[in-house]
Every structure is written in structure tokens, then in C-alpha cells.
Amino acid sequence: MPGGGVRRYLAPLAFLVAVTIAVVLIRAGLESGADSRGASTLTTTAPGGPVAKRYWTVRAGDTFGVIARKTHVTVAAIERLNPKVSSTSLYVGERIRVQ
């Protein structure tokens, strides 16, 4: 049967291509979401116009240093925006203002 050998490899090849594409898309999504993992943006109105406030939802292993690095905000700014939050006792699910 001519061409039968090629067909035999078509399904596994198509599967490998599909899996490779899925892995690339998932990794791209994870990497692009790495900076905003857990972050949300709320917009409010202030006397000078709209002001964007960004919040970080704390996840396991987060510290002010980790949050600062991932949001490109200094630790000092996070401490200033969250005066009642202790940097040594963050809890999972807590919202931290980062901007």
C-alpha cells in the first residue's frame, strides 16, 4: 500500500504539533501573567481626574520584596500605601495596594 507508511505517522505527528502549540501558548500566558499574577486594577475618580489604583492579592510565599519585584514598585512605596499592613504577617488572599 503506497503512502500507507506516511499516514501511519500523521496522527502522532499532528498530536505532537498540537501539544507543542498548547505548551507554548500556556507558557506564554504564564510568563506574561507573571508580573500581574494576582493583581487587579480598580479605577476611581478623584478631584484631579481618574486615578488608577492597583491591588495585589497575596498568595503563598509572597513578601513585600516579592510583590515589589513582580509589580515594579518599591518596597517603600508598598509600605507607604499600606500603613496598617505588617510586612511580616501577610496572609493569603489579603489585598495589598501597589499603586
Image: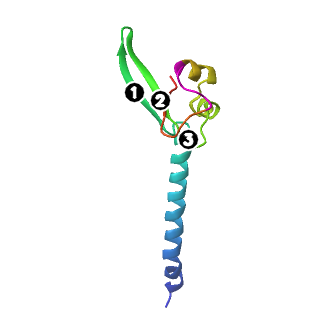
Residue 51, above or below 26: above
Query: 41 and 56: which one is in front?
Result: 56
Amino acid identity at mark 3: Ala
> Would you say the magenta stretch is mainly helix, strand or loop?
loop
Mark 3 secondary-structure assignment:
loop
Is the residue under label 1 in contact with that under label 3 (CB below 8 Å)?
no
First to last magenta residue range: 81-88
Q: Earlier in the sequence, mark 2 or mark 3?
A: 3
Q: Residue at x 54, y 84 (%)?
A: 5
Amino acid identity at mark 1: Leu
Disc 3 marks which residue? Answer: 34
Which residue is at the far right? Answer: 65
Q: Earlier in the sequence, mark 1 or mark 2?
A: 1
Mark 2 secondary-structure assignment:
strand
The picture places residue 10, in percent across and down from the top left corner, at: 50, 75
The picture places residue 71, in percent across and down from the top left corner, at: 56, 30
CA–CA distance between discs 1 and 2? 8 Å
Q: Residue at x 39, y 8 (%)?
A: 48
Disc 1 marks which residue? Answer: 42
Coloration mode? rainbow
Crowding around mark 1 (Cα neighbors within 10 Å: few <14, some 14 to 19, many 20+) is few
Residue 42, above or below 25: above
Disc 2 marks which residue? Answer: 55
Amino acid identity at mark 2: Tyr
The picture places residue 15, in percent across and down from the top left corner, at: 50, 70
